[in-house]
Amino acid sequence: MSMIPLHRMNICAVLGPDRIEALVRAFYLRVYADDDPQFRSMFPDDMESAIQNLSEFLVQRFGGPPRYSERKGAPALRARHARFSITRPMVERWLAHMRAAMQEVHIPEDLRAPMDGFFTETAHFLQNSESE
Ligand code: HEM
């Protein structure tokens, strides 16, 4: 399978916004059930708002309508994550939940590698703490 760069592939056109939201819901159900208090306690009580934020961001980033920026402005992900202490183990937990969610909602095989590559790169970019 060839790796198609994310910017040349409209993932949203293939999956549609509803499947992207289903992915994010499956992801956040796992996040909110996580038994590591350091990880779980970062996330707000309102799971539905977290689902809306990440769903709209991903629809936009994957080539769909820019609802996220219309509602909230520039994604500025580093800045929006600055108030959380994101260590390497937190990065790995986030990615593990997202990979499990991609399996759960049956993301098509040819989208797995580009999506996983994007999530992996972004999650490591968001690590902002060395401490445990
Ligand atoms: C590296 C591990 C990560 C941790 C621990 C983390 C944690 C969080 C937390 C606690 C929130 C607040 C929930 C909310 O109010 O929406 C959040 C928001 C968000 N995260 Fe992450 N995140 C991580 C990685 C990522 C990645 C890889 C992406 C993108 C692919 C991402 C995209 C977002 C977006 C778009 C928001 C909403 C920001 C806003 O509008 O305020 N995050 N994240």
Image (cartoon, rainbow, N blue to C red):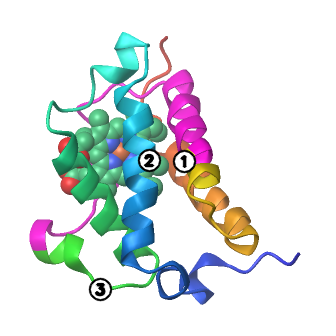
Does 131 sit left or right of 112 as displayed?
left
Separation (CA) of disc 1 from disc 2: 5 Å
Q: Is residue 36 above or below residue 24?
A: above
Q: Amino acid at mark 2?
A: Ala
> In the rendering, at what x and y percent does residue 91 appear?
52, 33
Residue, disc 3: 65
Mark 2: few/some/many CA within 10 Å (<14, 14-19, 20+): many
Q: Looking at the image, tell me whether mark 3 or mark 2 is earlier in sequence order.
A: 2
Q: Which residues are magenta?
A: 71-100
**Mark 2, residue position:** 26
Q: On the image, which quarter does residue 55 sit in?
A: bottom left
- Nearest to the observer: residue 84 or residue 35: 35
Q: Is residue 26 left or right of residue 78?
A: right
Of helix, strand and loop, which mostly describes the magenta segment? helix
Looking at the image, which residue sits at the far right?
A: 1
Say whether disc 3 or disc 1 marks the residue closer to the N-terminus.
Answer: 3
**Residue at the (43%, 67%) spot, across then down:** 20
Residue holding disc 1: 101
Tag 3 near tag 2, CB within 8 Å:
no
Which residue occupies 69% across, 63% down?
A: 112
Callout 3 touching callout 1 (CB < 8 Å): no
- Are the two marked residues, 1 and 2, in contact with CB atoms closer than 8 angstroms? yes
